[in-house]
Amino acid sequence: MSVSLAALSHAHIDEVVHLIQAPARRMLADAGATPEAALARVARLKGPEQIREMLERPAPDVLLGARDETGQLIGVGGLKLTAPGTAELHTLYLAESAQGRGLGRLLMQARIEHARHTGLDVLHLRTATSNVRIQRLAASLGFTLHEYLDSTTMPGVAWQVWRLPHLQPLAAVAPAHDRDLLLPA
């Protein structure tokens, strides 16, 4: 499968919302949220207005999109500045058809490389304690578990914060913007 990565713009809001809402609800339900709480949280945090706000943030903030060979959006991943020199990786969602093919790793590496190129020093990643796949991926990329947090908006849901200090060069990862990549079929 051929995949291209590029920063997303306002023209992509509806596509992004469509891609992320179902997996976001599923992830929150898996983390222990009731279906109603998951739906309400996703609508509040991942609706069109929130995506628009993500896209309007100044650099180094970015929302990257991955498209397959037909041009369909199959993955998104964001980076948000949280303090001078520090950013959070957020909003990593993949279409069901794209899971298990290395696209999550590719989007993580692209955001790490973007952070490195923009002079950031530390990255954080917050994930539900039930999301073992992203935790394994984060560990394989050099992140370490930093702290546990209880959700303030969804009782019973706990979060982990992972940290990647002192960004190190990644071997064989080219800059993320506007490039075509081949993933195993």
Image (cartoon, rainbow, N blue to C red):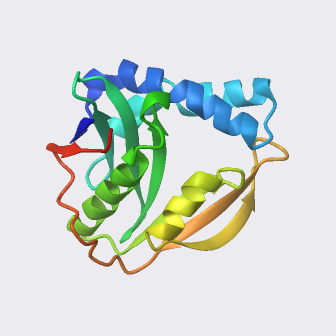
Whether residue 159 can be seen here = yes
Q: Where residue 52 sits in the image (x, y, percent)?
A: 38, 30
Identify the residue at horizontal 27%, vertical 30% (top origin). Answer: 68
Q: Where residue 39 sits in the image (x, y, percent)?
A: 69, 24
In the image, 179 versus 101, the foreground residue is: 101
Identify the residue at horizontal 55%, vertical 54% (top origin). Answer: 134
Whether residue 7 can be seen here = no
Vertical placement of residue 29 versus 11, above or below: below
What is the tally of numbered marks visible in this picture?
0
Identify the residue at horizontal 24%, vertical 38% (top origin). Answer: 3
Taking the image as shown, residue 183 lies to the left or right of residue 33, namely left
Taking the image as shown, residue 134 lies to the left or right of residue 165, namely right
Vertical placement of residue 149 versus 90, above or below: below
Q: Residue furthest front?
A: 185
- Residue 169: image quadrant is bottom left
Taking the image as shown, residue 146 lies to the left or right of residue 184, namely right
- Residue 144: image quadrant is bottom right
In the image, 79 versus 85, the foreground residue is: 79
In the image, 15 versus 173, the foreground residue is: 173
Identify the residue at horizontal 65%, vertical 38% (top origin). Answer: 27
In the picture, the quarter occupied by the N terminus is top left
Q: Where residue 175 sits in the image (x, y, percent)?
A: 18, 58
Vertical placement of residue 73 versus 155, above or below: above
In the image, 145 versus 182, the foreground residue is: 182
Vertical placement of residue 18 versus 161, above or below: above
In the picture, the quarter occupied by the C terminus is top left
Q: Where residue 5 sits in the image (x, y, percent)?
A: 23, 41
